[in-house]
Image (tube, coloured by chain):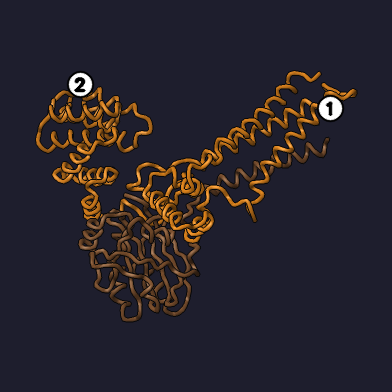
């Protein structure tokens, strides 16, 4: 009679095999509703990672699906249509590797693994039913080996799942300052005039916000509030993400205080930013400065500076500056 | 029994090894693999001119060296290289070279404004690409991408990322000498604004 460890290892092994089969069925091709869908689901979107041209909302994928439909209307075969796409994009465009040539073993290996696993389990149960069972409890007994085998199977499954997860990872949504390749081009090196021209040419495109904020922040740091103001306002008018709106509110708050001397409005705008991203160190620091210098309230400012210093991973230069401000505010000095 | 177990464990070990190898390779950008068009006849679609003055058949350029560039107004590196593309169009026109610039995923108005703002050449040909057929035919992953086609209509070179005067000049010279420059990765490419 096998002990608990043996049974557990056996069931775990079976569970891994069953999970693999279910995953293979779920992730495999679904019955095609039409030929275009069937072909499109085999073609990887060239500007995405892991999405087919059926699934991807990108313009490239939509164009490729239109081409597939047009070729079907022209009477082309599936192979002809796929070959046309592969002729310009390489075989990397295929989501499933071809079941022939060098990639044939990729299709055969899982079945070989499944067969080997079934043989192991069949042999195990055959051995249990035999009149001369192996010795149990000795260092070389079956349970130990089965636990080892089950453990290796689970490890292999975990690595395979992690690998698939990485393969299916989507590209980041914000493409404004991100590219496909990663060499040579530094957006930071682009001049303000170039960024202005790109933004002007894409006024209707909401994904331009990242670039707009980068430019506005650049003007803000240069002290050119007049130019920064318009871009922050445009970001707020575009139904931005919370972090984008918070960045805009915070800097607008500082600008109306620093540029126009409007302390209350400045604090209100910074508070709107803090409501969207609570605890933002930069917003807290600016609020502290406005409170100290505009409201002449060093005690309240000191509390805010103190909160800034609790932020982990604060830039050392910023920490030095805030610490100095805190000491002065705590001693009641004016800013 | 022992043989079967060792075979099964060996299979598992090989699978784990392959999973690790694949996981390191999936991060590679397929846009950087050599274009299968290199050494093959260049696609020669007929496309509308950007200025609306009718269609242009790319096959009519057979016998000339053709530089095919994909660009858009929202593409920052495209702005970097635009002056050099126009300069190359002017400098090499008399040596049998034509620069063709094709709009990639952009409106006609924005692309025209982009050329007005930057630098355009009367020697270059500017085309639009409805439904992205030309971009698909050339296997464009992102822009800027530039293809170099020899007098026989064969793709002999490709530049991924922004070109400059040196790259354009040396590559065109190499094609005129009958060489095949192949693929160069110069910098980042973008697939949308």
Q: In which quarter of the image is the C terminus of chain A?
A: top left
Q: Is mark 2 on a helix, strand or loop?
A: helix
Is B164 above or below relative to B5? below
| A76 shown above or below A248 | below
Q: Is residue A268 visible?
A: yes
**Which chain is depicted brown?**
B
Residue A83 x, y percent position in the rendering: 52, 58
Task: Give the number of callouts.
Answer: 2
**Residue A62 percent across, percent down from the top left:** 39, 49
Tell me: B71 left or right of B36: left
Of pointers 2 and 1, the one earlier in the residue sequence = 1
Mark 2 Cα shell of 10 Å, populated few (<14), some (14-19), many (≥20): some
| Residue for badge 2 | A299
Please say if B144 is above or below A327: below
Task: Write down which chain is painted orange.
Answer: A
Q: Judge from the rendering whether residue A261 lies leftward or rightward of residue B25; answer left or right.
A: left
- Which residue is tagged 1? A127
**Label 1 chain ID:** A
Judged by depth in the image, the label closer to the viewer, 2 or 1, is: 1
Q: What residue lies at 29% left-to-right and 54% top-to-bottom? A: B106
Q: Nearer the viewer, residue A320 or B2?
A: B2
With respect to residue A108, does B93 lie above or below? below
């Amino acid at each position: 009679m096998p002990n608990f460890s043996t049974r557990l290892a056996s069931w775990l092994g079976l569970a891994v095999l069953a999970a693999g089969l279910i995953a293979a069925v779920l992730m495999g091709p679904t019955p095609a509703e039409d030929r275009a869908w069937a072909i499109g689901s085999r073609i990887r979107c060239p500007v995405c990672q892991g999405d087919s041209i059926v699934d991807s909302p990108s313009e490239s994928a939509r164009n490729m699906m239109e081409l597939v439909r047009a070729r079907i209307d022209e009477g082309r075969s599936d192979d002809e249509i796929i070959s046309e796409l592969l002729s310009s994009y390489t075989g990397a465009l295929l989501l499933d590797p071809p079941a022939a040539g060098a990639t044939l073993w990729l299709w055969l290996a899982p079945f070989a693994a499944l067969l080997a696993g079934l043989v192991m389990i069949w042999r195990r149960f055959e051995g249990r039913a035999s009149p001369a069972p192996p010795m149990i409890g000795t260092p070389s007994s079956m349970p130990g080996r089965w636990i080892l085998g089950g453990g290796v199977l689970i490890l292999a499954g975990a690595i395979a799942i992690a690998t698939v997860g990485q393969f299916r990872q989507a590209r980041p949504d914000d493409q404004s300052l991100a590219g496909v390749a990663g060499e040579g081009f530094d957006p930071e090196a682009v001049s303000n005039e170039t960024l202005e021209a790109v933004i002007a040419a894409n006024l209707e495109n909401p994904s331009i916000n990242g670039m707009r904020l980068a430019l506005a922040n650049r003007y803000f740091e240069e002290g050119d509030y007049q130019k920064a103001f318009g871009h922050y306002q445009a970001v707020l008018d575009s139904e931005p993400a919370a972090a984008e709106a918070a960045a805009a509110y915070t800097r607008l708050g500082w600008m109306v205080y620093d540029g126009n001397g409007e302390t209350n409005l400045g604090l209100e705008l910074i508070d709107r930013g803090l409501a969207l991203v609570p605890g933002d160190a930069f917003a807290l620091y600016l609020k502290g400065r406005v409170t100290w210098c505009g409201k002449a309230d060093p005690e309240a400012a000191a509390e805010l500076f103190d909160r800034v210093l609790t932020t982990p991973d604060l830039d050392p230069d910023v920490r030095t500056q805030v610490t100095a401000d805190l000491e002065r505010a705590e001693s009641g000095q004016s800013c | 029994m022992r043989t079967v177990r060792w075979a099964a464990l060996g299979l598992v070990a090989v699978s784990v090894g392959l999973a690790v190898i694949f996981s390191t390779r999936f991060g590679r950008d397929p846009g950087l693999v050599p274009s299968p068009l290199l050494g093959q006849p260049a696609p020669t679609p007929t496309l509308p001119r950007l200025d609306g003055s009718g269609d242009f058949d790319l096959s009519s350029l057979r016998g000339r060296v053709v530089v095919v560039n994909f660009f858009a107004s929202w593409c920052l590196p495209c702005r970097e290289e635009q002056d050099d593309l126009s300069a190359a169009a002017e400098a090499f026109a008399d040596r049998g070279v034509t620069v063709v610039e094709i709009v990639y995923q952009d409106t006609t108005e924005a692309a025209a404004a982009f050329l007005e703002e930057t630098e355009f050449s009367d020697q270059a040909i500017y085309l639009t690409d409805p439904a992205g057929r030309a971009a698909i035919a050339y296997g464009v992953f992102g822009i800027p991408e530039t293809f170099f086609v020899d007098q026989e209509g064969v793709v002999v070179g490709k530049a991924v990322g922004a070109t400059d005067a040196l790259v354009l000049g040396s590559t065109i010279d190499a094609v005129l000498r009958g060489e095949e420059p192949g693929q160069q990765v110069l910098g980042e490419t973008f697939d949308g604004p």
